[in-house]
Image: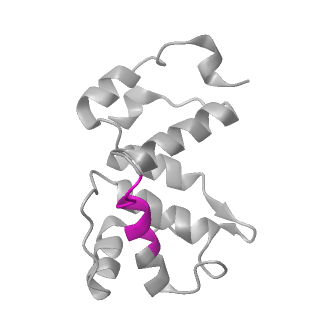
């Protein structure tokens, strides 16, 4: 059952939003990434330092990155697209740039889309643990 059918924010979410806005905290990103997998199984997560190194390697600067948003996007790309639609690390760096700095996007887009997915899948989040 969709979580938004009950109305209002889940317990602790307002405190999370007060602290991080509509962006990934380190703990929220780790939680979200821990649930990602490929057909072959779990992925080995890409760290924030690794994302920064990849972006630097390909001279990519993000304008709209906040918190751990780019780390979430990098891991989502790895789980869902890398090795198929996104053929290599250079294209992954471009994917991260396009997703984070999408000209018709909005602030907090990665987190909002993730939150919408949790609602649609009925995944409960212990918000107090994500702060």
Residue 31 screen position, x and y as percent: 49, 47
Residue 54 left/right relative to 79? left
Residue 62 left/right relative to 44? left
Q: Residue furthest front?
A: 104
Residue range (magenta): 95-104
Say above or below: 117 vs 74. Answer: above
Please say whether residue 43 is visible from this viewpoint. no
Question: How many discs appear?
Answer: 0
Which image quarter holds the C terminus? Answer: top left
Say above or below: 93 vs 97. Answer: below
Residue 3 screen position, x and y as percent: 62, 23
Q: Residue at x 27, y 66 (%)?
A: 62
Residue 65 left/right relative to 7? left
Residue 128 left/right relative to 87? left
Residue 55 screen position, x and y as percent: 31, 78
Q: Main secondary structure of the magenta part?
A: helix
Q: Nearer the viewer, residue 116 or 30?
A: 116
Is 120 magenta? The answer is no
Q: Residue at x 60, y 66 (%)?
A: 79
* Color scheme of the displayed model: one colour
Say above or below: 84 vs 34. Answer: below
Please say whether residue 59 is visible from this viewpoint. yes
Which image quarter holds the N terminus? Answer: top right
Q: Residue at x 55, y 71 (%)?
A: 78
Q: Residue at x 49, y 19 (%)?
A: 10
Residue 127 screen position, x and y as percent: 43, 28
């Amino acid at each position: 059952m969709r979580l938004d059918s009950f109305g209002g924010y889940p317990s602790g979410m307002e405190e999370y939003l007060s602290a991080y806005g509509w962006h990934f905290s380190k703990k929220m990103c780790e939680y979200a990434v821990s649930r990602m997998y490929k057909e072959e199984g779990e992925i080995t997560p890409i760290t924030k330092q690794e994302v920064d190194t990849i972006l630097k390697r390909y001279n990519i600067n993000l304008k709209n990155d906040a918190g751990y948003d780019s780390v979430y996007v990098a891991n989502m790309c790895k789980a869902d697209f890398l090795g198929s639609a996104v053929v290599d690390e250079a294209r992954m760096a471009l994917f991260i740039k396009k997703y984070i700095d999408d000209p018709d996007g909005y602030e907090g887009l990665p987190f909002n889309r993730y939150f919408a997915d949790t609602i649609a899948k009925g995944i409960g989040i212990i918000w107090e643990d994500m702060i």
